[in-house]
Amino acid sequence: MPENAIVAENLVYRYGDLVAVDGISFEVAKGEIFSFLGPNGAGKTTTVSMLIGQRRPHKGRAFLLGKDITRETATIQAQIGVCFEVTNLYEEMTGVENLKLFARLFGVKDLDFNALIERVGLAGRARDKVSGYSKGMKQRLMVARSLLHQPRILFLDEPTEGLDPVSAEAIRNIILEEHERGVTVFLTTHDMQEADRLSDRVAFIDRGEIVALDTPHNLKQEYGQRMVVAEVRGAEDRLEQREVVMDQPDTPDELQALFREHEVVTIHSREATLEDIFIEITGRELA
Amino acid sequence: MQWRTIFPLVGNDLIRFARNPYFGIITFLYLALFVGIYLALPATVEDHFSLGLYAPELDEALHQDLEVDGLELRWFDTEEELQQAIQGDAVYAGLVIPANLLVELAMGARPSVTAYLPDDAPPETAEMMRVLVQSLFFEMLEQPAPIMTQREVLGPDLAGDPIAPRDRMVPLIVTIILLVATMGQAALIASEIETGAADALMSTPMGIGEFFVAKSIGGILIAFGQVFVVLMIIGALAQQTLIVLILVLLGAMLVIGIGFLMAATGWDTPTLMALGFLIMIPLSAPPFDILFPGTITGWGLLIPTHYLSVALHRALNLGMGWGNVWQEMAILLAFCVVLGIAGVLVLRTKFR
């Protein structure tokens, strides 16, 4: 059994009467990319806040790298990197000044800032004030800030939300690079395609509870339906879509009927997406 | 306490303060405030005069004869109590009428009464007291009385060496600079909380304790540093240097607590500046009283900057030493502690 980087045991957090996180438990292995998926308000960010030591759970415990986060907060925080959902940089400072401040807070002395800045695609803008950066540039700087002390666990809270495709792809590549370096990545997102592509395992969280947790492949196997989707020519020459669910006893007959009764223009197979599965499990959409 | 996490944040605060566009125009704003307050003040010095009296045997007669509009009388049981009341600003001036005064008058002697004046009383006050005594006994005896009025100043007598108005203004300048500095510090902290930068700091090994220590050091450096430079430029550190510097340090500590309370509102910089000006008005009243004696009365004792202003005035303008300022220093320190604790507790609630 792989050694765990994160262990959450029955975590509970309330905002007054509202239970934001309702007794969730899970484990994340070292070196794993673990995605936390759910709609806004599901409890993702609150869970991250507890795991990084910013909120004290009202119930339950969380262990990072074998240590209780509520007891050894500073020790653990020295080994984790956090990229927040909101842009929380010092806007009146330059990019490199932001990085230097946090490098000193983490006690990092021999950091090649230029290499780090280049890695996140901000070369040439490092000496500019952050207030002049685009959202994508700010997000990349926050990712750089979370990496500067070479953390063993990386928490990324909606790192690509609202970004242009180039910036989003740059951040996804950095996540994969860190994964190859052996870093454990805890990713919260409601971008199912991103989670599907990057994650070793995903957990669906809804109304503060984990409703499913497995590899994307296994979730699709368990909850998803494989389909054949065909475009056929219908009345007045219009194209219409027909779907046949696979792996059912009458699938062969339905496929034969499709070809027999229609002029099939295009046909392809389609696997269930994580979003389909989330809707299947919770009855809710992600957005 | 991890000091390696504190100093980078202090340095960061100093840079952010210097780069904040709002504080560049603050100077002009508080100069405008000076003008506004000056115009709002009465054109006359004082139309309500609080006089302390120690007059054994004459109390009853004086009670009837001294009912004059604008004259507030307080009676004291001993001469020492009267002197303490004047020095503690409970009454403005005092009059001691000896017990045997009427007997001496009847015997044809020229008795004298003692008029106690505060050290910062303008010269005309002594003459006013003499006229008051003459009027009082004229009313009582229905004829002019040959009574001498001996003037006695409590503290150094500055009648021949008056303090220049600009020197009287120094406590006001110090107070305003400290308050403007704390507005800046409050705005910086509020923006850190508002933008979530404070959350980013709290995700590092820096703890909440280090955060508050860093903010306190940064705020004190900003406030103390500005006052120090100004005092250096105007040459105000020539006498009682250590006392003055300690007082300014206490003043900087005092405004840090106020700054934390302001920052806890979470308001943006312009709104915090507006709040700062509101707070500045009452806190500036005591130093105005140094500039224009008699501006405020006993309620000024409730304002923490009263103790800063009085002690600064005594040290800077009167050259007084520790013996004349330690009480004010102690009270100022107590205010620093109370406001500091209140500020930390309130601002602490803004963190998760």
Image (spheres, rainbow, N blue to C red):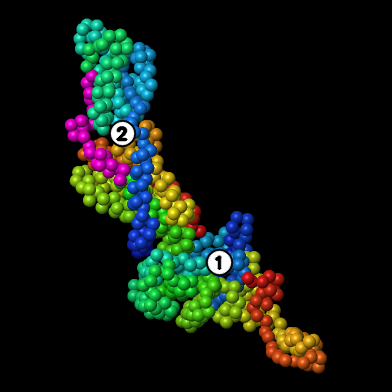
Drawn side of residue A65 relative to residue B51, left or right? right
Tell which tag, 1 or 2, sits nearer the viewer: 2
Q: Chain of mark 1?
A: A
Which residue is label 2 attached to?
B293
Residue A194 at x, y = what percent?
A: 57, 79
Would you say residue B161 sits in the magenta stretch? yes
Asked which secondary structure carries label 1, the reply is helix
The reply to whether dot 1 and dot 2 touch (C-beta < 8 Å) is: no
Q: Residue at x 33, y 31 (%)?
A: B44
Write down the region rendered in magenta. Answer: B149-173
**How far apart are labels 1 and 2 at the CA level?**
59 Å
Do tags 1 and 2 sit on the same chain?
Answer: no
Residue B106 at x, y = what percent?
A: 24, 6
Which residue is label 1 attached to?
A45
Rendered position, B329 above or below B50: below
The amino acid marked with disc number 2 is Pro
Which of the two residues, A58 or A246, is positioned nearer the viewer here?
Answer: A246
Which of the two residues, B155 or B27, is positioned nearer the viewer here?
Answer: B27
